[in-house]
Image (tube, grey):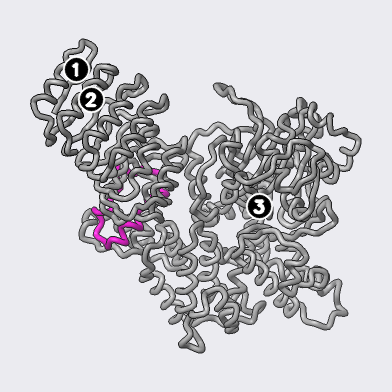
Amino acid sequence: LRKRCEFAVEGTAEVGSGTHLNRIYTELYITEGKCEGVNIQHEVWQLETVSKMEAMHDTPIKCHEIFKVLPGQRRFIRVVLTNGIAGIGKTFSVQKFTLDWAEGLENQDVSLVILLSFRELNLIREKQYSLLRLLRDFDPTLHLIAAENLAVCKVLLIFDGLDESRLVLDFQNNEVVSDVTQTSSINMLLINLIKGNLLPSALLWITSRPAAANQIPPSYVDRVTEVRGFTDTQKEEYFRRRFTEESVSSRIISHIKASRSLHIMCHIPVFCWITATVLDHMLTTDQKQLPKTLTDMYSHFLLVQTKRKRQKYKKGHEMIQQEPRQINREVLLKLGRLAFEHLEKGNIMFYQEDLERCGLDVTEALVFSGLCTEIFKRERALFQKTIYCFVHLSVQEFLAAVYMVHCYLNRDIDVLATFLGEDWDTNSSKPGMDSFLSRVVDKSVNSRNGHLDLFVRFLHGLLLESNHHLLGGLLGWTASSPESIQTAINNLKKMNAYDISPDRSINIFHCLMEMNDHSVHQEIQEYLQSENRAEKKLTKTHCSALAYMLQMSEEVLHVLDPKKYNTSVDGRRRLLPAARNCRIARLSACGLSEKHCEVLSSALMANPSHLREMDLSENDYILDSGVKLLSVGLESPNCKLEILRLDNIYIAVHCFTTVLPLLLPFVLLKNCSLSESCCDSLASALKSTSSHLRELDLSNNNYLKDSGVKVLSAGLESPHCGLETLRLSCCRLSESCCAHLASAIKSNPFHMRELDLSKNKVKDLGVNLLSAALGSPECRLKTLR
């Protein structure tokens, strides 16, 4: 383990050729969190949140302490799940933990550490193994350990890279495996390890990118941690170490700070390496115009690497007849095809057969081009099979965009039709660039998790004349006309896609910035400084840009009320991401649907979550699926919501009645067609020891009736019920319900302060029944309507 972990490689350096880990390791922020729902944002946009969170005073957990119980905690930590976006430092943390243990520095209470990677488990996913045999194959030194010894010693199993897994983890339908000598499939062994059926005394540490973390149900995870990468201070330290001359390092740091997109990406250590590689070359060759956009940076990175390899090629391969540029072009496009096809599938790890399907002869490419070794990594797995990956996910996304632009410029209709659909521009033998880009954007905005967002940004940036000039010689491209580029910009501003996620629509704004069009950004800045905002008509693209700026502002917005903005209904919905950075969200009658509930759920789960009050009244399109998404957010430990209004929502409100009383102090469900069955769920919740409900408004629910109040009263009688205000105005109640309410008040007289029975036919008899309850000396009721 010491030999395996003591050297760290940066970028694409070969394993074993790097620097000793302890010399370069920087303590990354690892913070404790909880399992959340599926993240609906591209990982790059998640970095935006990280950049804001630096101002918070989170207490970091050092990687060697992830299994230690924190002060105030009593639970035993057996399974730890560590989240972090691609390239943020998860594997480095695993490497540091393992090296410290192997050198006798930390966690010496652990008898045995076994490091397994999902990329290697993928290679044997079709085979049958016992856990004992699997561990012995991964670590031959374990052949001397007997099965009974594994059960009595303290073992730590580290599974690195869940997001790279091609195993199917079904925690509902699986066989029980409890013996380390019992043979089963790899996925069954893993499921039973996580559940604690197999080797229950073992500690488990699993790392994953956020999008894949939900494969493991939260109930089986004792601690969730997050690796956040470089802080702003650590970014500067990195570049000052890399560039020892003060004037050079200061210029680079200033340049990165001037570009928000570059500065945010530098939270990722690998991107710092890419940036340093590019800027080092440009400054030593006296190039004055440094990259300002992501596309600029990656275009220069590709060019720098091919130039370096071309120099080596000329020295070492003079006998080769074919031109280096032609070889690089062929290899690059094959790599682009690989990147593109697997980006759609969500794969970031590749094997020999994947490369061969794209016509890529790796041996030839490595010998004759050298390009692969600069942007493509290869590792020799324990099972004598080579694994390949791009140096970072963003490089894969960039090459995928390069390949797609090449297919468009060379009219590769088969590839375009497969990606964009057979019906795309069938009436034109030569579809225009604006039609091509519009179709790509349409496809990307319909992605739930935004996996095409950065790809689409690169696609737009590559069509600029400056980037055509950079890569044209390498790829044989000709520049697009200024007119076609302007048409593409205008189409982005006018894009009229209906019912898309507000998060996806923000990417349209980023695409404009990537094409060096800052007009929308400037117009919104002027709008925010204006005193006559009501007079300014906002387009939908304006609203997306405004939502982005409000969301990223360091100042928390007090009230978000989309109806106050002079825009269309769809424009108002595009403002929804700003709910992540406001205290009160007034969203009544906004025509919200499931896509919008995803955004609101993520706002409730955010760390920190600022929302305290939310009004979703009169949104008839919030169906069962939307309700479930909101419930996930409400159940998050980060959720601090106190008041939720759901007046005049007729569909699926019964889905709320179990979860809301357990989570919120104030719930308003006026005119929601609630029935007796809903009261049964509410009563059960009111009896719960974890109920927080203090105010409940059920007014104007005509189907509630006396039978519903009778059921509800059973919950009010519970000593666990702390309800202070109950409103039942206009619910078609009669005097018979008063007997049940009076009984409840007598049984639990200590909390109720206000009871509203107005606009019901309770008559004198009902009033008399309630009056008897009010006579109790323990009764706290102050207001009776």
**Do the numbered discs 1 and 3 sit on residues whose CB atoms are within 8 Å?**
no
| Left-right relation of 99 to 726 | right
Does residue 254 show up? Answer: yes
Q: Give the camera-side residue of 337 and 185.
A: 185
Q: Residue type at mark 1: give it.
A: Ala
Q: Residue furthest bottom?
A: 429
In three-dimensional space, the C-alpha distance between marks 3 and 2, rounded to whole angstroms, equals 52 Å
Q: Is residue 14 magenta?
A: no
**Do the numbered discs 2 and 1 sit on residues whose CB atoms are within 8 Å?**
yes
Q: Residue type at mark 3: give it.
A: Val
User: Which of labels 3 and 2 is toward the front?
Assistant: 2
Does residue 293 show up? Answer: no
Q: Which mark is residue 741?
A: 2
| Left-right relation of 422 to 546 | right
Q: Residue type at mark 2: give it.
A: Leu
Residue at image position (58%, 84%) is: 411
Q: Position of residue 304 (x, y in %)?
A: 68, 67
Residue at image position (38%, 45%) is: 581
| Left-right relation of 598 to 96 | left
Q: Is residue 574 magenta?
A: yes
- First to last magenta residue range: 550-576
Work out which quarter of the rendered image holds the C terminus and state it.
top left
Q: Which residue is mark 3?
A: 168
- Would you identify the image quadrant in which residue 303 lies? bottom right
Q: Which residue is mark 1?
A: 773
**Mark 1 vs 3, N-terminal side:** 3
What is the secondary structure assignment of the residue under circle 2? helix
